[in-house]
Amino acid sequence: MRDYEEVTAFLGEWGPFQRLIFFLLSASIIPNGFNGMSVVFLTGTPEHHCRVPDTANLSSAWRNHSIPLVLQDDRQVPHSCRRYRLATISNFSALGLEPGRDVDLEQLEQESCLDGWEFSQDIYLSTIVTEWNLVCEDDWKPPLTISLFFVGVLLGSFISGQLSDRFGRKNVLFVTMGMQTGFSFLQIFSKNFEMFTVLFVLVGMGQISNYVAAFVLGMAIKLEDWRMLLLALTVPGVLCAALWWFIPESPRWLISQGRYKEAEVIIRKAAKINGIVAPSTIFDPSELQDLRSKKQQSHRILDLFRTRNIRIVTIMSIILWLTIAVGYFGLSLDTPNLHGDIYLNCFLSAVVEVPAYVLAWLLLQHVPRRYSMATALFLGGSVLLFVQLVPPDLYYLATVLVMIGKFGITSAFSMVYVYTAELYPTVVRNMGVGVSSTASRLGSILSPYFVYLGAYDRFLPYILMGSLTILTAILTLFFPESFGSPLPDTIDQMLRVKGIKYRQTPSQTRMLKDGEESPTILKSTAF
């Protein structure tokens, strides 16, 4: 009996049809990513200080000195969340006293921004922060919103995975795209922050792609109003609806549902596009294994902790994925806090990922996995620690170091998918990669709070992310080396963690057949 791969082998591996579908699916990713990282601009916090109402009876001198000054980056700037007590300075103004000459400003009583804030419009005309005054006592709300968005991503990934088995890959793909586009439109008309947050979480549940495409935002035109920016980022998602007539349903899923005729139509169309003459009979129900009735040994998530070796690999993988995600998303979300133009910085954050992926591809081809991962993580973590040593007047150097850190962490992030899949045996490979990927989602949920720590110390996020990345690089050296090794099929055949002694048994040794070639690279993690 032949399986699906054997039946469709005549199509070839990478013909015009496969390339067309790959291009169309890649195009559908871009609008999804827009909404993921649009928060970098939507939640931007401009410089601000307490508003002093025009009705206040103050002289021009006292109005100019109504806000206390604080030292920030070696310069005096108005305090963001405090002002001098308005009633007190109004009395001094009425008495004709001059600030600094007749009154010691350092001794004056201060109060919070009872009349709201005035926001600089040098970069943004408005953001959700300026519209709903999410500063000072409420400055924890924007990072919470970002975290809830990634919670939505985690839930959306789980739900879409469950629904795709029941309703089909194509249907779920376009329904989630529609969810994301629809809820993004509703965000534009939201009247309060709580409604915006709910919709933002729902947009996250519509996310079905990774976030590489999100950095195309760096090339965005400077739409200074957050609603106009969100509208500009949402419209391309509507255009993806046209892909419905070009992206077919998965033939494998159709076969699992017993819909052989529909699957055969798609396969014959693929053969025609590839210039291949299809056999007269493609799917023979009496021969083809029905995926619905195909019984395999069932495995549960607890099998990832069954033996000592797989338990250690699982725990180490969770730590590895979580830490890398914190660094990757933390540096991405920290882009507005860098010196210089925010749009240019975001564009540079995108550009630096291109050589990072090229380097990762080359390392996977020629260098052992452990050393590739450890080198990339050491590079990313160490340069982040050096950021605190850069003099304030060399802020361009600090930006370069942050981009190099992003380069290293991005390379590690792209390699960890392949590495993790090579470590787990076939029987639990999808489950192992899934648990590790879930850990990365948890890392993305935590990352906004690492960025938020920059409000207390500008270098604290870099110190924490750099330290964690270096510690994870050291941990990576204890992983088994999978480069050039055949993929394990069972838990007993897994490679062993370095530095731990095991009793070797005959059943735990896997021998290659005569003439069998050891695969050096896992080209796909879709098992």
Image (spheres, helix red, strand yellow):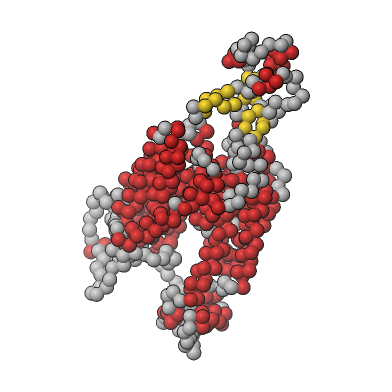
Return the x and y of residue 322 as percentages of the image width and height: 43, 48
285 or 120, nearer to the observer = 120
295 or 235, nearer to the observer = 235
- Can see residue 236? yes
Q: Is 295 above or below relative to 309?
A: below
Please report the residue visible at 64 percent of the width from the left and 20 percent of the height from the top: 65
Residue 197 placement, left or right of 392: right
Return the x and y of residue 7 as percentages of the image width and height: 44, 81
Please report the residue visible at 43 percent of the width from the left and 46 percent of the height from the top: 403
Residue 270 placement, left or right of 501: right
176 or 410, nearer to the observer = 410
Q: Is 84 above or below relative to 18?
A: above
Return the x and y of residue 49 as percentages of the image width and height: 63, 29
Please report the residue visible at 45 percent of the width from the left and 33 percent of the height from the top: 393
Give the total of numbered labels. 0
Specify the quadrant of the image occupied by residue 263.
bottom right
Q: Is 57 above or below relative to 378?
A: above
Q: Is 215 above or below relative to 64?
A: below
Return the x and y of residue 494 as percentages of the image width and height: 31, 60
